[in-house]
Image (tube, grey):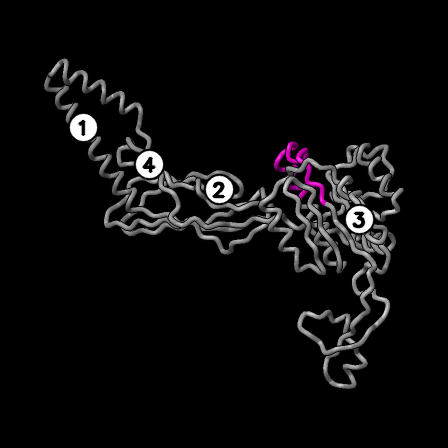
Amino acid sequence: MKVNKLFVIFTIIIAFLFFIEGEVIFNLAFYCVILCWIISLISLIISYFGISIEIEFNQRKYNTVDNYDFNLKLKNKLYSFIPFAVVNYISGNKLVTKMLYMNLHKEEKIKSEIMFQYRGIYDFNDFKLEIKDIMFIFTKYKYLKNKPKIRVYPKVWSIKQDEINKLNYIFKTVIGKNLIENDYLNVKDIRKYKYNDSYKRIHWKATSKTGQLYVKNYENFDNGKIKVFIDMNEYIMKLGKSVEEKYIEYSVSMLSYIMDKHSKFEIHFINDNEKTIFSNGKSEFGQVMEYLIYNKCTGKKNVIDSILNPKNAAEKDCMCIIVFKIDESLREKIVLLEKSRIKYIVFYFEDKYLSTIKIQCFSMSKMMGNG
């Protein structure tokens, strides 16, 4: 609780004159000041316990960058007016201050919007209502009655169509058809359709004969997998939270494309808290997003060193490397990949270091369209 300093000084002066001078006017002033303190304190207590504040969101999961609506709900629970309340809230990424006078049993609903700039979990612990007494002597803060936990994930940007066409061609050329989803060699047998089976696997001849849906079972060849390595070195965070957030958004967007198009892969987060996700489809994309809302770029390892680790390096696999920048030291390490005959594709975020570097790499910033 805060107290008006000027009124405190004024009270001390009046009290000094009351005890030293003792004149009638100072006696009257002193008792008036004491009465003001009492009335202000009572009105503050009434306002504090008489008003409630809640925040309402339409959902519990959001993405960065986009704007979302929310409501602030304030209610006077008493049969008396609340003289003065100030609420500070975010609207359109700007701080807005609104002063309220609330009649008895009045309910005030403030509609606003918010844009989450950074991924993470928001609990709104610091969201507060500023309540003042009738004479503006005291100020007390009241916090949210309900504290909704909002999960904010990195935004997944769409890739431009012409860039998608290039990527499709590149993946077929570099990776080879054996790693592309639904590009199998031999049909082993057929079976009845099950929920979630791809329609591309339907055996139309058997389906037309029997009147029931049948799908093809393919022979299981170990043709390798796509291994995605995402660089989450601590130097990225040192460049600023906004830069790190945009890099993660673009990395997730590339990962979403890869998971949509290909069926068998591993995802390696090269971070202080390292994690590997094994997947046979996009069902594990939720694990990726959950990892990223809890983890920022704090790693110390070099992403290429992790790739060259014998347990990760295999000629039949393809390495998709997502890095913030490509400098000379990274280029030298990528040369080692070429000597090891490892297939690779590099996606990068910042291109200011690329003037003299000649490797197979693609700018994520140029590929992204709208979310």
**Residue 181 picture location, percent across and down:** 79, 62
Between the C-alphas of marks 3 and 4, the distance is 58 Å
Ranked by sequence position, the earlier of labels 4 and 2 is 2
Ranked by sequence position, the earlier of labels 3 and 4 is 4
Q: In this view, does 174 lie to the left or right of 157?
A: right
Residue bearing the label numbered 3: 319
Q: Is mark 4 on a helix, strand or loop?
A: strand
Ranked by sequence position, the earlier of labels 2 and 3 is 2
Amino acid type at circle 3 is Met
Residue 236 in the magenta stretch? The answer is yes
Between the C-alphas of marks 4 and 2, the distance is 20 Å
Residue bearing the label numbered 4: 140
* Magenta stretch secondary structure, dominant: helix
Between the C-alphas of marks 2 and 3, the distance is 43 Å
Residue bearing the label numbered 2: 90
Q: Which label sits in the foreground, 1 or 3?
A: 3
Amino acid type at circle 4 is Lys
Residue 15 in the magenta stretch? The answer is no
Residue bearing the label numbered 1: 34
Between the C-alphas of marks 1 and 2, the distance is 38 Å
Q: Is residue 236 left or right of residue 220?
A: left
Q: Give the residues in magenta.
A: 230-248
Q: Is residue 247 left or right of residue 309?
A: left
**Residue 137 picture location, percent across and down:** 28, 31
**Residue 323 picture location, percent across and down:** 74, 41
